[in-house]
Amino acid sequence: MKIVIWGAGGIGCYYGSKLQLAGHDITYVARGAHLKAMQNKGLVVEHERLTFSGAVIALDQTDLLNNYNCDDFDLIVLTVKANASQDIISQSRHWLNRGNTPVLSLQNGVENEQLIAEAVGNSRTLGGLAVRIGGHIQEPGVVTAKGIAQIVLGCWPSLAATNATKCFAEMLVDTFNRAGIPTILSEDIQRELWRKLLINNGVNPLSALTELDTRSITHDPVYKHVVYKIMQETALAARNQGVDISEKDVDEMFTLISEFDAIKTSMLVDKEKGRPLELDGICGPVLRNTTNGQAFMTAFVNRLLQTPAL
């Protein structure tokens, strides 16, 4: 397959390298020093079960939009930060609509798929999430990742989609699995996205405030209760949106993040590097869809915004 990894940071480069090693034609879209390093020296990805080092096709967004057609590719994988989704989709809307290539979101948050669907339609939109993976740019052109690195994907908003879209999703699951990426097809990807948000909203902001990794937070006698409370508020927001997230889901996801490897969250890494935080993408859906937890989450986010970068 010919695949674009749009937003080739830690997560995107890990999955892209796995697919490239499996023989697929991967184009990495990045920017800044990381892009220049990939263009001049290639890409290095290090993981406990993978070492990739080699030349890659790396472009910036302008090169992609000006020199390629959407239909030059079989799949577009969007791995940009959630706070960049609106701008990127707006800037590329005409380019996307001159083709029929499906778009798969592998991003934090629960609102990216709707933005994509508004631009290209439900039939070309695939929801997805990266599960049990931590990945970061260690230095330009060098990525480190850890974890099982699974993918869950599905038709948007559910498998009650066209037969063609469902068949493409099934083919994609098979393709990813053959590339060594454990992937499953969900019949309700919206619910899976909210389940992941339980974790992201539960630990990302708190880790950026405390400068602690996920293991430290979830095993701290005080912070672990804060994490669980935030997860409960996230579940309430999901139910207010008509998504069935139960207390059992909260327990399962709290156990999952508690037992996962100790990792720096993406929000903590962004704060350390002075980059914009994914506050709206991760915390926004809870702020917008709860009443009981709104004051708590608003105060929490405001505190984070006032905390200087490390």
Image (cartoon, rainbow, N blue to C red):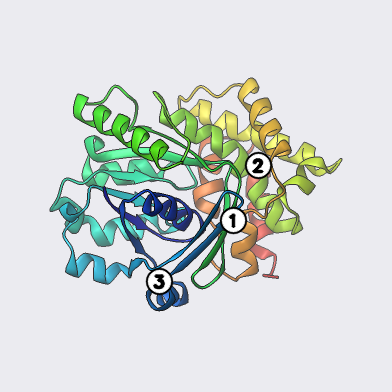
Tag 3: amino acid = Arg
Q: Earlier in the sequence, mark 3 or mark 1?
A: 3
Residue 31: image tag = 3
Relative to the observer, which residue lies in front, 231 or 143?
A: 143
Picture quadrant of residue 113:
top left
Q: Where residue 230 appears, x then y in whole percent?
A: 67, 38
Q: Is residue 90 left or right of residue 52?
A: left
Residue 292 in view in this figure: no
Instruction: Read off the residue under disc 2.
Output: 202
Q: Where residue 122 appears, x then y in whole percent?
A: 25, 36
Between the C-alphas of marks 3 and 2, the distance is: 30 Å
Q: Secondary structure at mark 2?
A: helix
Point 49% across, 44% down: residue: 109
Q: Secondary structure at mark 1?
A: helix
Q: Where residue 217 appears, x then y in whole percent?
A: 77, 46
The reply to whether discs 2 and 1 touch (Cβ–Cβ < 8 Å) is: no
Q: Where residue 181 appears, x then y in whole percent?
A: 46, 41
Relative to the observer, which residue lies in front, 189 or 46?
A: 46
Q: Earlier in the sequence, mark 3 or mark 2?
A: 3
Tag 1: amino acid = Ser
Is 103 located above or below residue 276 in the figure?
above
Picture quadrant of residue 128:
top left
Mark 1 crowdedness (10 Å alpha carbons): few <14, some 14-19, many ≥20: many
Instruction: Read off the residue under disc 1.
Output: 266
